[in-house]
């Protein structure tokens, strides 16, 4: 899972179109701030490029953190990672830093920008949105369950 940090969706920002830039700033910048606060290093962000690598200090902190997670938390994290293409977003959801609705908005920044520009494709975007909510809701519930199990141990 650690390898996803270097290709994390929220670390690749664009300078155009304006709708995308606005949504990235609105949904991803607070998430990047949280990562810096939680792990002590801000993720590297690439603008209009296809490559970046994360600071070694951040990678070490992420590796250490992943080793602390329970099997249920790891399974939930993996599910979220595949849905959102973001380890940072997935960790924020897992730890209750983001609600399911906030995670959905952050995960769909590109799609929402496309919808603003070109319109919604009926029976596609709406179905995908509902499915994302169901799946990320399950991820969050697994995290809550894991927290309850840890508390009672």
Image (cartoon, rainbow, N blue to C red):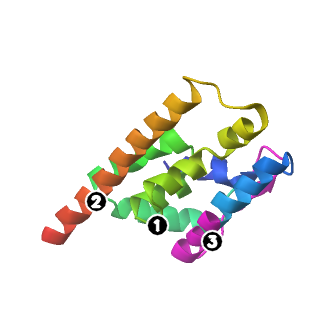
Instruction: Give how far apart the Cα atoms at labels 3 and 1 are.
Output: 11 Å
N-term mark: 3 or 2: 3
Q: Is residue 45 magenta?
A: yes
Instruction: Give how far apart the Cα atoms at labels 3 and 2 are.
Output: 23 Å
Asked if 146 appears above or below 16 in the picture, the reply is: below
Quarter that holds the C terminus: bottom left
Is 22 placed left or right of 139 in the picture? right
Q: Is residue 56 magenta?
A: no
- In the picture of the structure, the residue carrying the numbered disc 1 is 97
- Badge 2 crowding class, 10 Å Cα cut-off, few under 14, some 14 to 19, many 20 or more, is some
- In the picture of the structure, the residue carrying the numbered disc 2 is 144
**Quarter residue 34 falls in:** bottom right
Q: Residue at x 85, y 45 (%)?
A: 17
Q: Which residues are magenta?
A: 30-52
Q: Residue furthest top?
A: 123
Q: Residue at x 86, y 51 (%)?
A: 15
């Amino acid at each position: 899972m650690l390898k996803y940090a270097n290709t994390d969706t929220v670390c690749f920002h664009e300078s155009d179109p304006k709708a995308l830039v606005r949504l990235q700033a609105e949904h991803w910048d607070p998430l990047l701030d949280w990562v810096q606060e939680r792990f002590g290093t801000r993720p590297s962000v690439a603008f209009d490029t296809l490559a970046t690598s994360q600071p070694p200090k951040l990678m070490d902190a992420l590796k250490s953190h992943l080793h602390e997670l329970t099997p249920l938390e790891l399974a939930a994290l993996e599910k979220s990672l595949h849905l959102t293409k973001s380890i940072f977003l997935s960790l924020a959801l897992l730890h209750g830093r983001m609600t399911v609705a906030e995670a959905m908005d952050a995960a769909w920044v590109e799609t929402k920008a496309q919808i603003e520009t070109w319109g919604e494709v009926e029976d596609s975007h709406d179905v995908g949105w509902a499915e994302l909510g169901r799946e990320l809701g399950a991820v969050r519930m697994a995290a809550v369950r894991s927290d309850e199990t840890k508390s009672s141990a």
